[in-house]
Image (cartoon, rainbow, N blue to C red):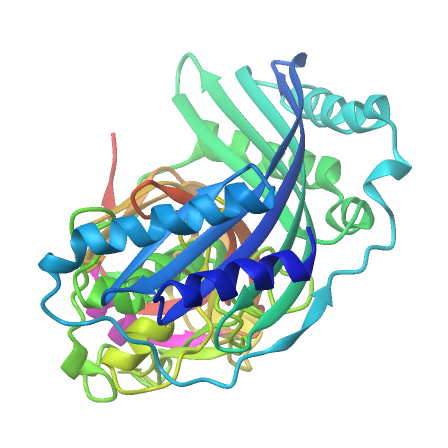
């Protein structure tokens, strides 16, 4: 795709009355391997390629896309978008406009040390086979009726041109490995565990992750949890929440409710609402001094990495909550104008056929300076919830519930006997106000965040340190 052709499309849209025009060429290439119970069930290579066009015309912002890349077809797509705008113009109560921004003109690329083509398909399949084999040979007293392994290479390339001077080229390769298992005991029941690795980069990531060793170690620990785990204490205790659980909590209870389109109600019929209101920004206190949540797409090697968003706004770190105060929602140029501020580069699309909308990238709770040992050293009786098996949160992101998976008693500052199925149930404010300590062990976990209608899934990281909560009464599942 040439820059000249995208510029021609934008100029044509302006010539027929558009106040703003944007043409985004995007190609997403996937290679996927899937094993179930050690048997290969899928080898797939797919390519999604096309141009998405947004037009601000007749006070309406519309979107259309095509996978036919000729000049005539692109012009017809512009006409489709303009036609939609005209048809909807009589419904507009408040004209749409964008914030004034200095847009980027440049390119960015994630460099790889080991190209995806440096291993054969059979060698990649061996990685998944080793995962399955090492898992089944690591347990002694339980069965593994189900294992599922998935290997995904994803290369995403974009070229974006808009009528406000933006021009950006991006190239980001991503690798992910997912492993899911069901562990079963006739006497003790069952548990399920999903493990995933994901980042931007090449095959060098496999040496960094060491997935086979990681799975072996975790499966051995989970076998002990299933066979010997006891119920959590019934009285209120201090609870230390592991970075995996913390990451999920901040993604769900800070990231989603701080999406500006959600705050304004756009997502109400799609992905939900938010407890946060526009007047809360800079004023509403949701937590204590430990409650600082950062959202940063520029973390090198991250799963949600990008340097410019799909409106060509330069990406940067955003503080969603800062020392417990609602600080900075995620914005695109449209919501930034409504909030009388500047865009912070949160506009992302899943593929060429998806409208750019406000999305998270890499969301985490700011770590502290303590070691894990210092975090638990004065806990007489408590619980450490390292990972989770299931979770849910309400529509406005206020009431939330997490069922622990790998969990342990804390006795006199030391980790002790494993615990089965502890339930952490609290409000968003209860979590962020209940933090009494955070350690320095920041860790990230990959995920695919869903939002929008039609639904879009984009790669993200979520993470944090280990976090101590005071005076928590845990439940238990049966």
| Residue 181: x %, y % from top left | 53, 25
Q: In this rendering, would 307 be left or right of 380?
A: right
Viewer-proximal residue among 65 and 126: 65
Residue 330 visible in rendering: no
Farthest residue, direction front: 15
- 459 inside magenta stretch: no
Residue drawn at the location 52% of the way across and 41% of the way down:
73
| Residue 101: x %, y % from top left | 45, 84
Q: In this rendering, would 383 be left or right of 103?
A: left
- Residue extent of the magenta highlight: 427-438
Residue drawn at the location 85% of the way across and 45% of the way down:
115
Residue drawn at the location 43% of the way across and 46% of the way down:
77
| Residue 350: x %, y % from top left | 48, 48
Viewer-proximal residue among 442 and 205: 205
Q: In this rendering, would 172 be left or right of 247?
A: right
Residue drawn at the location 73% of the way across and 48% of the way down:
209
């Amino acid at each position: 795709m040439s820059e000249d052709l995208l510029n021609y499309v934008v100029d044509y849209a302006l010539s027929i009355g558009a106040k703003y025009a944007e043409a985004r060429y995007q190609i997403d290439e996937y290679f996927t391997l899937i094993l179930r119970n050690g048997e290969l069930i899928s080898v797939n290579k797919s390519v999604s390629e096309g141009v998405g066009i947004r037009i601000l015309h007749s006070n309406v912002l519309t979107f259309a896309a095509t996978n036919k890349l000729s000049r005539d077809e692109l012009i017809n797509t512009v006409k489709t978008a303009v036609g939609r705008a005209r048809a909807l113009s009589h419904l507009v109560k408040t004209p749409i406009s964008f914030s004034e921004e200095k847009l980027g003109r440049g390119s960015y690329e994630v460099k790889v040390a080991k190209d995806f083509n440096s291993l054969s398909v059979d060698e990649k399949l061996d990685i998944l086979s080793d995962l399955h084999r090492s898992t089944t040979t690591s347990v002694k007293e339980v069965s593994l009726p189900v294992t599922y392994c998935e290997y995904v290479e994803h290369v995403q390339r974009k070229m974006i041109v808009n009528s406000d001077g933006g021009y950006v080229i991006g190239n980001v390769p991503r690798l992910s490995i997912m492993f899911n298992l069901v562990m079963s005991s006739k006497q003790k029941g069952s548990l399920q565990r999903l493990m995933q690795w994901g980042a931007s980069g090449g095959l060098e990531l496999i040496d960094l992750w060491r997935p086979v060793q990681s799975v072996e170690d975790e499966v051995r620990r989970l076998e002990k949890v299933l066979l010997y785990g006891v119920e959590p204490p019934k009285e209120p205790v201090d609870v230390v929440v592991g970075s995996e659980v913390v990451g999920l909590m901040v993604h769900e209870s800070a990231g989603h409710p701080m999406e500006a389109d959600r705050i304004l109600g756009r997502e109400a019929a799609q992905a939900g609402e938010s407890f946060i209101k526009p007047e809360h920004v800079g004023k509403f206190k949701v937590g204590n001094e430990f409650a600082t949540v950062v959202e940063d797409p520029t973390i090198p090697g991250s799963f949600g990495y990008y340097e410019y968003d799909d409106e060509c706004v330069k990406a940067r770190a955003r503080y969603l909550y800062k020392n417990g105060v609602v600080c900075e929602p995620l914005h695109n140029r449209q919501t930034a104008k409504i909030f009388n501020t500047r865009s912070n580069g949160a506009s992302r699309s899943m593929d060429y056929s998806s409208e750019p909308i406000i999305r998270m990238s890499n969301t985490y709770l700011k770590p502290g300076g303590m070691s894990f040992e210092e975090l638990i050293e004065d806990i007489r009786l408590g619980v450490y919830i390292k990972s989770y098996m299931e979770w849910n949160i309400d529509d406005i992101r206020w009431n939330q519930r997490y069922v622990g998976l790998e969990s342990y008693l804390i006795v006199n500052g030391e980790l002790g006997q494993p615990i089965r199925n502890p339930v952490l149930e609290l409000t968003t404010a209860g979590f962020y106000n209940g933090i009494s300590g955070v350690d320095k062990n920041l860790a990230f976990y990959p995920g695919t965040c869903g939002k929008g209608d039609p639904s879009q899934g984009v790669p993200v990281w979520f993470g944090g340190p280990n976090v101590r909560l005071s005076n928590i009464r845990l439940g238990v599942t049966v």
